[in-house]
Amino acid sequence: VTPEQVWTDLTEYMANFGYVVTGQEAASGGDLVVSDVVMSFPMAEVDPEGALTISMESLTFTDNGDGTVTVTFPPVMPIDMSFVPEGEDERVDMVIEYTHEGLNMVVSGEAEAMTYDYAATMLGLRLAGLMVDDEVISRDMARVDVTMGPVEGRTEMATEDGMRAMAQVFSLGDLSYDMAFNDPE
């Protein structure tokens, strides 16, 4: 596979789930760097104006010279959500930081049938910001930190006649979480 084929496959995969994917592509030798990556998903079922957006400074697709491509992710990927919960009047805006340590992804196969092998020492999710009706909710009032690892997995994706088939096996290792909520009312 080539870096361009892997980027195309990832964008098509996300589009299948309803995401709109944008980014600025730049070739660098045989590699591909995509900067200002934004994956946005409307949350119309919850709120006509609601949205979920995943942002990445850049993704690098490195041609390994043997028919495989290594995908490099930034260490922090913010996930922004904005919505009004069903039956409520107050808008909720939150930022969740998706983090990793040692995330390694290598893609192999062919354009129509790719295998994604990945591993990480740790994957994490952290509630980094929360606002309800423009009022900031501090980490003393709402805190969520989740880590898992070591993580290892393989995803095989094939596309035929416009349909995508996927088989996935992965292990999350240890899961640990720290959550606290303090309702002032």
Image (spheres, rainbow, N blue to C red):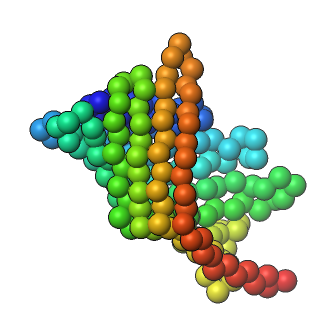
| Quarter of the rendering occupied by the N terminus | top left
Taking 96 as reference, is 18 above or below it? Answer: above
The residue at the far top in this view is 161
Give the residue displayed 59% in from the left and 42% down from the top: 41
- Among the 4 quarters of the image, the one containing residue 8: top left
Where residue 34 appears, as percent x and y from the top left, is: 30, 43
The residue at the far left in this view is 29
Give the residue displayed 55% in from the left and 47% down from the top: 169
- Among the 4 quarters of the image, the one containing residue 93: bottom right
The residue at the far right in this view is 87
Where residue 101 appears, as percent x and y from the top left, is: 39, 67
Q: Let me know if residue 185 appears in the view.
A: yes
Give the residue displayed 50% in from the left and 67% down from the top: 149
Q: Let me know if residue 58 appears in the view.
A: no
Where residue 68 appears, as percent x and y from the top left, is: 27, 38
Where residue 55 appears, as percent x and y from the top left, is: 44, 52
| Left or right for 72, reference 40 | left
Taking 113 as reference, is 86 above or below it? Answer: below
